[in-house]
Amino acid sequence: MVKRKTKFMCQACGYESPKWMGKCPGCGEWNKMVEEVEVTGSNRRGAFAHSQGGTAALSKPAPITSIETVSEPRVLTDLKELNRVLGGGVVKGSLVLIGGDPGIGKSTLLLQVSSQLARKGNKVLYISGEESLRQTKLRADRLAISADTLFVYAETNLEQINRTIENESPGFVIIDSIQTIYHPEVTSAPGSVSQVRECTAELMRIGKTKGIAIFIVGHVTKEGSIAGPRLLEHMVDTVLYFEGERHHTYRILRAVKNRFGSTNEMGIFEMKEFGLEEVENPSEIFLEERSRGAAGSTVVASMEGTRPVLVEIQALISPTSFGNPRRMATGIDHNRVPLLMAVLEKRVGMLLQNQDAYLKVAGGVKLDEPAIDLAIAVSIASSFRDKPTKPTDCFIGEVGLTGEIRRVSRVEQRVQEAAKLGFERVILPRNNLSGWQAPAGIELIGVSSVREALRAAFGE
Ligand code: TYD
Ligand code: MG
């Protein structure tokens, strides 16, 4: 028997409550509680139904030693960047959520991937709830895509979708997008918290019982009535975010969660006239537009997952004209900026308190590891003194509060990437110097304090 119950749910964090509240106790946001209808009873399929194989069969605990190890069967796409972000290809039976702003290129990416998988002999079902079959065909023509085993289907009713999957038994299903799909048993509107949740749970059940890999597109929305992909993160196996600035052609695919591989991997694509193309050497691109020899610009070798990338960090320090000095940062944690400025002020004696500071990572990348500290500090010093650093220098190191330069991970890979791109000197933590071999033609300068690093950078 199906029962319906009304409750209130926070659209930001999913907090549930029997009564309406102005402020959500879960996340502290205001006016986020909306009424939701909960469906209970025999027809309800919860998120964990698949763990019982979709039936009521009893499973028993087993000693861990008796369980056979099988590696996940994976299928490779033609996009190496995507394979790497997924942890080595698409895992059969996995549920992958691809989130991103509307218009960033999610449909384009998935249509390309669909045709690649289809051309390898897999049956792929691309379900579009947003575009008609004709529109999808137009896009496919533009991308020069065609494959006999790629099926497109314009449908938003989950029961119909379920039936079609049942009849067609594809190996891969793409749902574009989860916000347009609705479960007829759930009364709230498509895109609402309970619809998105129920539909995802149902898709997961279908995928897991039949071994179908399912990609779900989820639009990230600022706020409002549409439930975003954040709500689904705990339910799916893998969460990828497709990011980039609309004005730039570069797109970055990031793994935020991955049950079958490492997170923090990133894949870089370029949106061209005829679809997305992968970028194999991101460092070259990030350094392409660099103005060599300008004050305030340095290059850091940062690790993005397992891969080193060289990125330019720019600083602009200028006297504050009124009020409190401004500290702004894009692409790096904005809390690092005042912290590093305080270290420069106290440990190097640089008078920065009446200066505005603007920091930017060029190329729209986001960096969030401590090894970029030194490059930020040197950029700030370079702009403040209006003295450029050598364009062939690269900086690596975490900066501590006493001005010390702390050891970083994977220094060898970082230095290799710098050498590959023609850098001549790497200024790095002294503690990182031993235990590995530097490639030929690159000079390593070990430093143990910010003061020492600045001396090396400006040749004082
Ligand atoms: P789309 O994949 O529709 O975005 P999403 O599904 O994330 O909403 O991408 C739409 C944008 O991509 C649109 O602005 C046009 C651009 N685009 C290209 O530049 N080249 C192409 O080959 C295609 C198909 C789209
Ligand atoms: Mg789309």
Image (cartoon, rainbow, N blue to C red):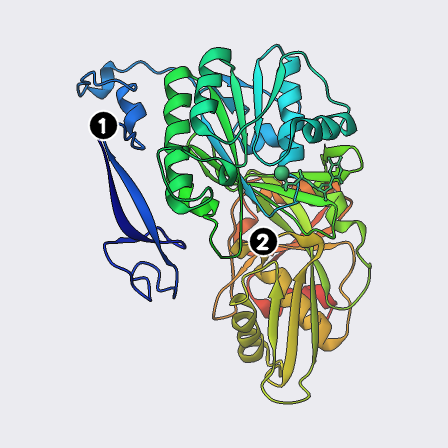
Residue at x 62%, y 30% (from the top left corner): 110
Q: Which residue is mark 1?
A: 42
Q: Which residue is mark 2?
A: 367
Q: Residue furthest bottom?
A: 322
Examine the rendered structure and indicate whether residue 197 appears above or below residue 382: above
- State the SS at label 1: loop
Residue at x 42%, y 40% (from the top left corner): 196
Q: Amino acid at mark 1?
A: Ser
In terms of depth relative to the viewer, which is nearer, 176 or 292? 176
Quadrant into which the C terminus falls: bottom right
Quadrant into which the N terminus falls: top left
Q: Amino acid at mark 2?
A: Leu
In terms of depth relative to the viewer, which is nearer, 454 or 171? 171
Residue 343: percent from the left, percent from the top?
A: 53, 73
Work out whether residue 79 can be spotted: no
Do the residues under discs 1 and 2 have CB atoms within 8 angstroms? no
